[in-house]
Amino acid sequence: MQTEPRNIKLLLMDCDGVLTDGRLYFGPNGEVMKSFHVRDGQGIVDWHRAGLVSGIISGRRSEGIVEARAKELGIRFVVTGSNNKVADLDHILDETGIPAEEAAFIGDDLGDIGLMKLVGLPVAVADAVEDVKAAASYVTKAKGGEAAVREVIDLLLAARLD
């Protein structure tokens, strides 16, 4: 299923490898740290200003890191530690009333493919694994954690102006 970018109303994304570069930093007491790109954050803010909805569906538990960043950016849906990304997608679609064909998902690894097959616009970051790139309708020029999300948002928002 391929949806015109201008029709996308819901932007969902994985976290590690999409909003971050996929690296995990561990402190001396076992605390985990992640690095987020500020341009992705600005893009998400712009997405919300346009009246559109966003969310994160991540297979990894975040110890509050992802939730804190999402709250700061106004991301409405945050699922971490997901064991079933497709079921999480279904829940979000039910809650918003937005059909799957009006949703985009940005992924990077094998656990994202099932969800990518269901949305209207599946996107892979430039450094995604090859199977994810093959499942994508669009592959970003930027790598995960290097403003790939901003690239997608800029493309989607520009399409709405056409």
Image (cartoon, rainbow, N blue to C red):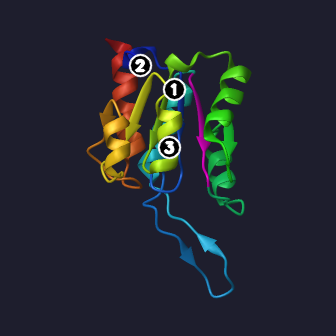
Q: Which residues are magenta?
A: 52-59
Q: Nearer the viewer, residue 35 or 110?
A: 110
Residue 118's mark?
1
25 lies above or below 77: below
| Residue at image point 71% right, 21% down | 94
Q: Which residue is mark 3?
A: 112
x, y percentage for residue 156? 39, 25
Asked whether the beta carbons under mark 1 and mark 2 sit within 8 Å of each other, the answer is yes
Amino acid on which disc 3 is placed: Asp
| Residue at image point 59% right, 15% down | 99
Q: Nearer the viewer, residue 20 or 14?
A: 14
Quadrant assignment for the N terminus: top left
Local packing at callout 2 (Cα closer than 10 Å; few below 14, some 14-19, many 20+) is: few
Amino acid on which disc 2 is placed: Met
| Mark closer to the chain start, 1 or 3 | 3
Horizontal relation, residue 60 to residue 126: left or right? right
x, y percentage for residue 144? 39, 53
Residue 1's mark?
2
